[in-house]
Amino acid sequence: MSSVYGEWLREQRKLAGLTQQELAEAAVMTRTHIAHIEAGRRVPSEEDARRLDMALNTGNVLSSFLPKDDSTIAEHFKSARELERQATSIWEYALAYVPGILQTKEYARAVMGVAYPPRGDEERDRLVVSRLERALILADPVTPVVWALLDEAVLRRPVGGPEVMAGQLMHIVGLAEGGRVRVHVLPLTLGVYPLMQGMLSLMWFEDQPPVAYSEGQSIGKVQDSPSEVQRLQSVYALALGEALPMTESLALMRAIAKDYGHHG
């Protein structure tokens, strides 16, 4: 749906004789954000859509036909999902599972298969598709910049079994070796560190202040208080300083993948 929306926006922009930069200036947005919307990688907020309608003189069409909220996305994550689409830089921390934007189909299916009450195959498949759609932000070779800070437990927990884990780890290694993401592992020998309370995602943007998103069991919260976001950024930086360098992190991931049965 977002790709159709983006194509329609591109058509209206061209009919108006505007470049992406000219539309961005008229709608008080960034050219990069316009480009992502037209490519179907992001969905504008309601306010963005309203300004686009005004800039293009399209009434309320762009506002009225915004892609609907995905019912497969947990309510507490919907705001974070929209911010994730707009971010120019994302720093992820994971204690238990591989971050969603880095998950393979097989790994995501294993994660979505664990729930109470149990999910049916159709519901699980919809959740997996929704999860994989998040990874489309990595289709852009540059933006967003993605760093992942992973507890070693994430690598050693056999989610989905050895074959799934080997594939998942080598997927991350491939993204890192290709220069698309940076990955650092916090070794188990480190013991305790301040980030261990749950998942954390730090996000930066071109046209708005940075935010943080933290998540626990069935709860999640977007933090936008400047002092709290700065505190979480500092905690992340401290943990990053304790992590293995990327070369050693990737070597560890390769070794663990080999233990899971990956060869080559």
Image: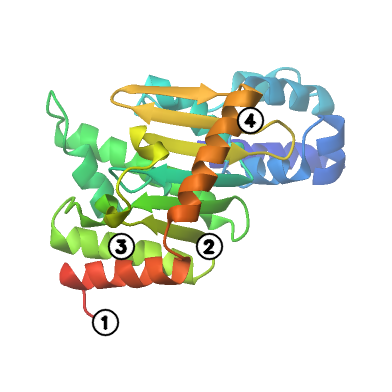
User: Label 1 belongs to which residue?
Assistant: 264
Q: Secondary structure at mark 2?
A: loop
Task: Say if residue 73 shows up in the picture.
Answer: no
Residue 64 falls left or right of residue 48: left
Residue 142 vertical position relative to residue 170 in the rendered view, above or below: above
Side of 2 where 172 appears, left or right: left
The image position of residue 216, as x and y in percent, is 33, 27
Q: Which residue is mark 4?
A: 44
User: Is the residue marked by circle 4 packed among few (<14), some (14-19), or many (20+) residues within 10 Å?
Assistant: many
| Vertical comparison of 250 with 81: above or below | below
Gap in angstroms between the C-alphas marked 4 and 3: 33 Å
Q: Position of residue 51 (x, y in %)?
A: 77, 23
**Which three-letter amino acid code belongs to the residue tagged 3?**
Leu
- Disc with the residue nearer the chain's start (1 vs 3): 3
Do tag 4 and tag 3 residues touch (Cβ < 8 Å)? no
Closest to the camera, between mark 4 and mark 2, is 2
Q: Is residue 261 left or right of residue 194?
A: left
Mark 3 residue element: helix
State how far apart marks 1 and 4 are (Cα). Answer: 43 Å
Residue topped by disc 3:
169
Q: Are marks 3 and 2 in contact (CB under 8 Å)?
A: no
Q: For this rendering, which residue is in front, 158 or 22?
A: 158
